[in-house]
Amino acid sequence: MRGDLVYLVQTDTTAGFLSQSASRLARAKGRSESKPFLKAISEFSLLVDIGRVPKRFKKEVRRSRKKSFILPNGNSFRYVCGKHRDFVEKLHWCYSTSANRHGEPFNEKYAKEVCDVVVESKEGFYSAKASEIWRLGKVKKVRIR
């Protein structure tokens, strides 16, 4: 598997684009390359490259399901434990975003046109409730979405 390709995958929350190339994802979504992407990780040991989780929230982050976190250094990540974990494990990590144009609802035809590889399961693709996003500070956390 090549990390510079854009994959269309059904995640545990919604259909999404996954890639190790942020610029390729930005072009697929039609959004600015300066806006950062969420990093999907398959192992907590990969957090060393992303940033430090404040001690106060380490247990919560380890036990979280369907939650994304923004660290004090501005980097964001999500520990993947759902249906697409096996896929992310093959890449070790990847940038993740919903499979739609920036600011628009999910359109399966569009998503299949702009991706390089379609990874489809027997359930097909669907759009569901997005994950929660939490900004972690040194002392408190704030819900973003």
Image: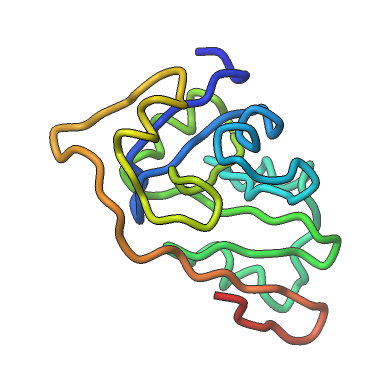
The quarter of the picture where residue 94 lies is: top right
Residue pictured at 41% horizontal, 19% vertical: 117
Instruction: Kindly give the residue lying farthest to the right in the view shown.
Output: 73
Residue lying farthest to the bottom in this orientation? 140
20 in relation to 78, above or below = above
- Specify the quadrant of the image occupied by residue 31: top right
Could you tell me residue 33's position as x and y percent? 75, 41
The image position of residue 23, as x and y in percent, is 71, 31
Give the number of callouts.
0
Give the residue at x 65% y 37%.
26
Q: Quadrant of the C terminus?
A: bottom right
Residue sitting at the far top: 1
Seen at 63% across and 64% down, the residue is: 69
Residue 18: x and y in percent read: 51, 34
Q: Please name the colour scheme applied to the rendered image.
A: rainbow
Comparing 66 with 113, the one in front is 113
Q: Is residue 33 left or right of residue 88?
A: right
Q: What's the residue at 57%, 29% (across, down)?
A: 19
- Relative to the observer, which residue lies in front, 107 or 48? 107
Rendering coords of residue 78 (x, y %): 56, 54
> Relative to residue 94, is residue 101 depicted above or below?
below
In the image, 90: left or right of 4? left
Could you say which is closer to the camera, residue 108 or residue 119? 108
